Amino acid sequence: MQLRKVFILGSGLMGSGIAQACAQSGIEATLCDQREEAVEKALETISRSVGKLLEKGVVHGTKEEILSRIHKSSGLEGAGIDADLVIEAVFENLELKREVFRRLDRAAGPDTILASNTSAIAISNLAAETKRPERVVGIHFFSPVPMMGAAEVIRTSFTGDETFALAVDFVRRLGKHPILVQRDIPAFVINRINYRANIEAMKLVQDGIATVEDIDKGLRLAAGRKMGPFEIGDLVGLDVTHGALLSIYEETKDPSFYPPAILRLKVGMGHLGRKTGKGWYEYNPDGSMKK
Ligand SMILES: NC(=O)c1ccc[n+]([C@@H]2O[C@H](COP(=O)([O-])OP(=O)(O)OC[C@H]3O[C@@H](n4cnc5c(N)ncnc54)[C@H](O)[C@@H]3O)[C@@H](O)[C@H]2O)c1
């Protein structure tokens, strides 16, 4: 058996990237969002990105063929969900995700696997909201999804072996290396490591020790990173990092994970990164960085 039809709830940065990755790998994907305009925007972004990847020869087939695998859904209720796999990619907020998992459990067929793309919330919290905890798993993608070569697959103590194996196979079919996370801890593996460094970088800026620009340049030019932590932070969204750090803090009560004041302030002011034109850096309307 293979997971062939995917339903994605939340059509922002990650939902749209996951749908694109599916369509490029021959997998049917349906996009859904509480805001219809988010789905429309996702379809435009995907169309542009697929065009570029075809030009570069990174992706094969025709644009029409790839885009024809992406469908729209207006909501969970009504027709229900006709899919082998549901991937939740709504805002990083525990209460919201809990409520969403209760709704997904009601709307999806009994065999459908429910997955979350959460950055940091332990998956067991979401599995516990359903009547199918053995069919709940974490599939954590990285941004930009069509470009990144790995995704984490997270097992809870309830996750069935078949569910885990199907999720791993799905990630492989997307052309990505599955990082197997054998125990359900907040923020899993890659973010656990990265957040430590990101918090340190934010505190160095907060304390006036070094600038955002110098830290990014330093890590690119002296530590072999492709992008600095603040460049990545703007791409990911400061609200996403903030929500993820709060989730880890709430679950572990480890104060070293509490979002630094400089991050809380920026999120409070609505400076969320590329999506709002301002975050650690400022951006022009065409997306280029202001000099
Ligand atoms: N941004 C990243 O780099 C990144 C990386 C890995 C994982 N994640 C995780 O993926 C998830 C989504 O992140 P994102 O960056 O795509 O966020 P985003 O803000 O770009 O998109 C979230 C979308 O969810 C929709 N939404 C919110 N509540 C909803 C509901 N009840 N029903 C339907 N749609 C709803 C919003 O309208 C929005 O379009 C978060 O859990 C985040 O932590 C993000």
Image (tube, rainbow, N blue to C red):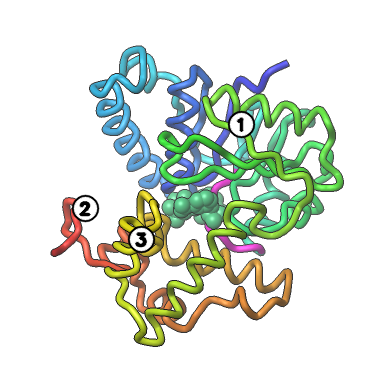
Tell which residue pokes out farthest to the left in this image.
291
* Element assignment for label 1: loop
- Residue 234: mark: 3
Tell which residue pokes out farthest to the bottom in this image.
207
Q: Is residue 90 visible?
A: no
For disc 2, the marked residue is 287
How many residues crowd around disc 3 within 10 Å: few (fewer than 14), some, or many (20 or more)?
A: many
The first of marks 3 and 2 along the sequence is 3
Closer to us: 29 or 279 = 279
Task: Identify whether 14 is placed above or below 241.
Answer: above
Whole-percent x, y for residue 272 in the image:
37, 66
- Residue 79: mark: 1
The magenta stretch spans residue 92: yes
The magenta stretch spans residue 125: no
Q: Residue at x 50, y 64 (%)?
A: 241
The three-letter amino acid code for the residue at tag 2 is Gly
Question: How many numbered markers are drawn?
Answer: 3
Quarter of the picture holding the C terminus: bottom left
Whole-percent x, y for residue 68 in the image:
40, 19
Residue range of the region highlighted in magenta in the rendering: 88-94
